[in-house]
Image (cartoon, rainbow, N blue to C red):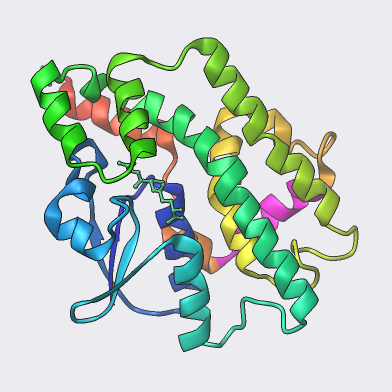
Amino acid sequence: MRLFHAWLSSASRRVRLCLAEKNIPYDSVAVDLSRQEQHAPEFLAMNPDGVVPALEISPGRFLHESSTLCEYLDDIAPEPPLRPADPYALAQMRNFVRWTDEKSLPHLLILNWSLMLQSTAQQWSDQELQDKLARIPTAERREAWVRIARKPYTEEEKAEALRKLLLLVDRMEGMLAPSSPWLMGANYSLADIAAAPFIARIAEIEPAALAEATHPRVHRWWQAMQQRPAFAAARLQLFGEVLQERQRATTPSR
Ligand SMILES: N[C@@H](CCC(=O)N[C@@H](CS)C(=O)NCC(=O)O)C(=O)O
């Protein structure tokens, strides 16, 4: 298998977590979002939405959409199972994953892109920007790139994005039972995998939201999540570290 992904992308991180949990070997192909490699015709042939991740499951056969990829991986490699056997619990798990897709990812993108992509995108000339926009398949993603290149999100918009992102912590606190470590109960599942990339970012942006005093169950969940061997294998590098590395790379040494 070949995973086309970006190291910092939450949807990509989700699939890396799942592959690691299943112990499935794969070749990693990093896609550089700042160079719009995800909008190149070769990438669009793998994922017509022009977003990472995409998974090549056999030569020339591709799948996209991180939640679908995770369910596919759970089908082809059933051990350990990452979905509840009970249909009602499975439906609840899917609704939670969908909720993170619809209610967490758009807000985190505002924060992540402002931090990681804005400085590059602002330097593009109008012509460069138009050329890049012409290759983006969806109006929604075109708008996101226009925002980051020309109409940077305001501090108010970023604060609102963070407020909405933090709703995930409240939702998880409500789902986690005192005696069960994971979102769907005793067994670790794709719900936990779906949440992990967002909580990893919240741990960096707003660590107080994960404090034992305010959200004891999420606090415990996050400790347990970080202990999993698959968490280390999936390499969710801190954004702060990546920024420092970038800074070192662009600062001339004396
Ligand atoms: N629903 C999709 C979302 C994928 C997505 O939004 N990926 C972002 C990074 S997390 C991306 O590739 N953005 C690039 C772009 O919009 O140009 C999934 O879960 O796979």
Q: Is residue 252 visible?
A: no
- Between 37 and 200, the one lying in front of the other is 37
Q: Is residue 3 above or below residue 82?
A: above
Q: Is residue 41 left or right of residue 174?
A: left
Stretch of the chain drawn in magenta: 217-228
- Between 67 and 213, the one lying in front of the other is 67
**Rendered residue at 58%/61% (across/down):** 193
Image coordinates of residue 203 in percent, x first then y, are 60, 37
**Rendered residue at 25%/24% (across/down):** 247
Queried whether the magenta region covers residue 223, the answer comes back as yes
Query: Majority secondary structure of the magenta segment?
Result: helix
Quarter in which the C terminus is drawn = top left
Image coordinates of residue 173 in percent, x first then y, are 81, 47
Quarter in which the N terminus is drawn = bottom left
Image coordinates of residue 233 in percent, x first then y, are 43, 64
Q: Is residue 128 left or right of residue 27?
A: left
Snapshot quadrant of residue 250: top left
Q: Is residue 129 visible?
A: yes
- In this rendering, the count of numbered labels is 0
**Rendered residue at 78%/40% (across/down):** 170
Snapshot quadrant of residue 143: top left
**Rendered residue at 23%/51% (across/down):** 31
Residue farthest toward the front in the current orientation of the protein: 139
Residue farthest toward the right in the current orientation of the protein: 178
Queried whether the magenta region covers residue 143, the answer comes back as no
Snapshot quadrant of residue 135: top left
